[in-house]
Image (cartoon, rainbow, N blue to C red):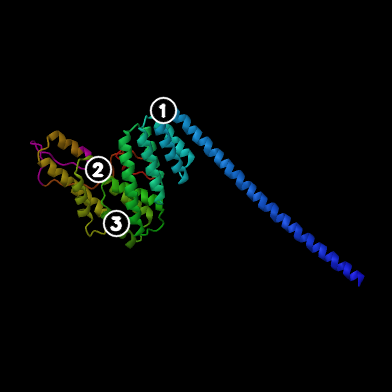
């Protein structure tokens, strides 16, 4: 009996020991988690404080008033709280000060970035336009107008995409490309029709991207040739109609552009202007009479696909940030 009691007591002590060890282990783990959480928070706070200090140093070299500096720093804080990186915010402040950007326009830069981010759309295309505009020393008012337009068009593009699912599509890329097409004068209903046709024909996003970029190029060409906005929209709407062949749509747009230019020529343009127009439409060679008008029966050749470069494009063909030459910044 005594031996049995000893065994029971020993077993009880072992169980208690295990419980104590388990509790101590749990407490240790919790303590470590709390320690690293607090440490990370302090490290993040320290990093953010250093970041703000760096911005204050750049702003100290500006001509901004104390009020304007605080206004900008508040906008920066809002941007970082919404997920804009410290690197991007610092770069934007540095280049804005370097270019003597009006402080209220600096605030507008951050406001557009934040509003775009809050809509659940990538802010990178907006940021790229700002950076490139500042690098090219573009008029800051043009930059503000361009990013506002870009942001609005990205919202429209997202709505178009939400109604049409394309195979193998990358949402951010699709939004960016469609937004550039809108900026270049391609009507939303035309893009919607292109997406519907693409869905019906089981086209991949790569194929959709090609056609939307070509439409953007044709729209940019029309703008460069001086065709009025209303006429550009009418050309695109007329070209697509009930046409299901997207290559034919592009051919129709090219032909209608030539017709629109011909109308302007017969309305009184000089021979020099006519020759300039011919040179502006690659692959088009409209015969000119001695009086400077287009000879009857003249037609248009097929579109070459070549267009002028974007005033604020990415400058590369691999479409890393998917700028298609739609920006008005130049």
Q: Secondary structure at mark 1?
A: loop
| Residue drawn at (18%, 41%) of the image | 285
Report the Cα–Cα distance between label 2 and label 1: 40 Å
267 in magenta: no
Q: Specify the segment rendered in magenta.
A: 279-296
Q: Closer to the N terminus: mark 2 or mark 1? A: 1
Which residue is nearer to you in this view: 273 or 91?
91
| Residue drawn at (26%, 49%) of the image | 186
Residue furthest right in the image: 2
Q: Secondary structure at mark 3?
A: helix
Report the Cα–Cα distance between label 3 and label 2: 21 Å
Q: Which mark is residue 237?
A: none
Q: Position of residue 30 (x, y in %)?
A: 66, 53
Q: Position of residue 12 (x, y in %)?
A: 81, 65
Q: Which mark is residue 62?
A: 1
287 in magenta: yes
């Amino acid at each position: 009996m005594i031996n049995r009691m000893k065994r029971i007591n020993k077993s009880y002590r072992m169980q208690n020991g295990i419980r104590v060890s388990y509790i101590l282990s749990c407490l240790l783990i919790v303590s470590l988690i709390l320690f690293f959480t607090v440490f990370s928070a302090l490290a993040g706070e320290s990093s953010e404080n250093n970041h703000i200090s760096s911005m204050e140093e750049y702003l100290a070299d500006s001509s901004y008033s104390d009020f304007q500096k605080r206004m900008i720093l508040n906008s920066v804080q809002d941007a970082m709280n919404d997920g804009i990186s410290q690197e991007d915010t610092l770069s934007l402040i540095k280049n804005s000060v370097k270019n003597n950007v009006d402080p209220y326009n600096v605030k507008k830069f951050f406001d557009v970035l934040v509003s775009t981010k809050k809509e659940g759309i990538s802010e990178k295309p907006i940021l790229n336009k700002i950076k490139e505009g500042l690098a090219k020393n573009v008029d800051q008012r043009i930059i503000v107008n361009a990013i506002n337009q870009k942001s609005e068009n990205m919202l429209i593009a997202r709505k178009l995409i939400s109604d049409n699912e394309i195979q193998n599509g990358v949402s951010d890329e699709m939004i960016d490309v469609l937004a550039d097409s809108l900026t270049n004068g391609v009507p939303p209903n035309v893009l919607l029709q292109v997406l519907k046709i693409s869905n019906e024909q089981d086209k991949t996003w790569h194929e959709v991207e090609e056609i939307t970029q070509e439409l953007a190029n044709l729209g940019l060409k029309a703008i460069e040739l001086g065709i009025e906005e209303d006429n550009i929209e009418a050309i695109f709407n007329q070209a697509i109609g009930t046409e299901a062949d997207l290559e034919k749509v592009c051919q129709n747009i090219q032909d209608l552009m030539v017709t629109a230019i011909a109308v302007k020529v017969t309305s009184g343009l000089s021979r020099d202007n006519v020759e300039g127009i011919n040179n502006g439409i690659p692959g088009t060679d409209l015969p000119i009479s001695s009086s400077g008008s287009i000879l009857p029966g003249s037609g248009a050749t097929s579109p070459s696909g070549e267009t002028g470069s974007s005033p604020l494009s990415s400058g590369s063909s691999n479409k890393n940030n998917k700028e298609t030459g739609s920006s008005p910044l130049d």
